């Protein structure tokens, strides 16, 4: 291997160094972009509170987390005049009801005004089922087991929304015990 590098001309060595620097920079840009896209709503989003529904949160493969389901995850077909297919993006308009936000409408296009969340349609029968990217809440192992029990008694989630509907989960608020 050393013999190969000894035979390279200075121009080839410079070309190799530039290629390596570009490769490393591109990889770092991907990591930074992924990180920023996950925390951007927490920094610049508007906080809202959603009601959660209990789900069995155990998984041997994904680590220590609590799996959350939201009341806005199941959207009645009565709330839309449009047809959706699995995999399509949908925008759920939210309205406040006693301090919690609930689904008011579902549509393909981003609403012009109001508060809304962007989700992806996962199921279409009997009602629409959407995922928003805020269904898993990761935490240390001991805390995850305690939170699992508390969430079954009822919980709310503080969510931050950006103006494009992207959401990030900030914290859980349990009605029985500590989250």
Image (cartoon, rainbow, N blue to C red):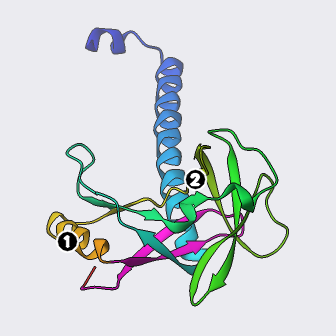
On residue 75, the disc is none
Q: Is residue 33 left or right of residue 145?
A: right
Which contiguous range is marked in magenta? 154-177
Q: Nearer the viewer, residue 84 or 116?
A: 84
Q: Which residue is mark 2?
A: 130
Q: Quadrant of the C terminus?
A: bottom left
> Of discs 1 and 2, which sits in the foreground?
2
Q: Position of residue 45 (x, y in %)?
A: 61, 75
Residue 90 x/y as whole percent: 70, 53
Q: Secondary structure at mark 1?
A: helix
Q: How crowded is the residue under tag 1: few (<14 C-alpha within 10 Å), some, or many (20+)?
A: some
Q: Residue at x 27, y 12 (%)?
A: 1
The single residue placed furthest to the left in the displayed view is 142
For marks 1 and 2, give the CA distance: 27 Å
Question: Extreme right residue here?
Answer: 112
Note whether 137 is above or below 77 in the view shown: below
Is residue 167 or residue 41 the one in the foreground?
Answer: 167
- Sort mark 2 into few (<14), some (14-19) or many (20+) by Cα contacts within 10 Å: many
Give how far across and how far down residue 80 sits, in percent: 77, 57
Q: Main secondary structure of the magenta part?
A: strand
Q: Residue at x 35, y 66 (%)?
A: 54
| Relative horizontal placement of residue 43, taking residue 5 as reference (left or right) | right
Q: Which residue is identified by label 1?
A: 143
Residue located 43% across and 13% down the image: 8
Q: Is residue 59 visible?
A: yes
Q: Quarter-wise, where is residue 110 in the image? A: bottom right
Horizontally, residue 101 falls left or right of residue 173, namely right
> SS class of the residue under badge 2?
strand
């Amino acid at each position: 291997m050393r013999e190969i590098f000894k035979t390279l001309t200075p121009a080839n060595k410079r070309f190799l160094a530039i290629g390596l620097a570009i490769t490393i920079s591109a990889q770092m840009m991907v990591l930074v972009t992924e990180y920023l896209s996950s925390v951007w709503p927490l920094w610049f989003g508007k906080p809202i509170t959603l009601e959660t529904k209990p789900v069995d949160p155990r998984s041997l493969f994904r680590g220590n987390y609590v799996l959350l389901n939201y009341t806005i995850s199941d959207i009645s077909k009565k709330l839309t005049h449009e047809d959706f297919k699995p995999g399509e993006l949908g925008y759920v308009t939210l309205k406040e009801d006693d301090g919690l936000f609930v689904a008011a409408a579902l549509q393909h296009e981003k609403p012009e005004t109001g508060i809304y969340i962007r989700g992806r349609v996962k199921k279409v029968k009997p009602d629409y089922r959407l995922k928003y990217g805020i269904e898993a809440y990761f935490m240390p192992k001991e805390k995850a087991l305690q939170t699992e029990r508390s969430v079954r008694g009822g919980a709310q989630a503080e969510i931050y929304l950006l103006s494009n509907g992207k959401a990030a989960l900030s914290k859980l608020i349990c009605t029985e015990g500590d989250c």
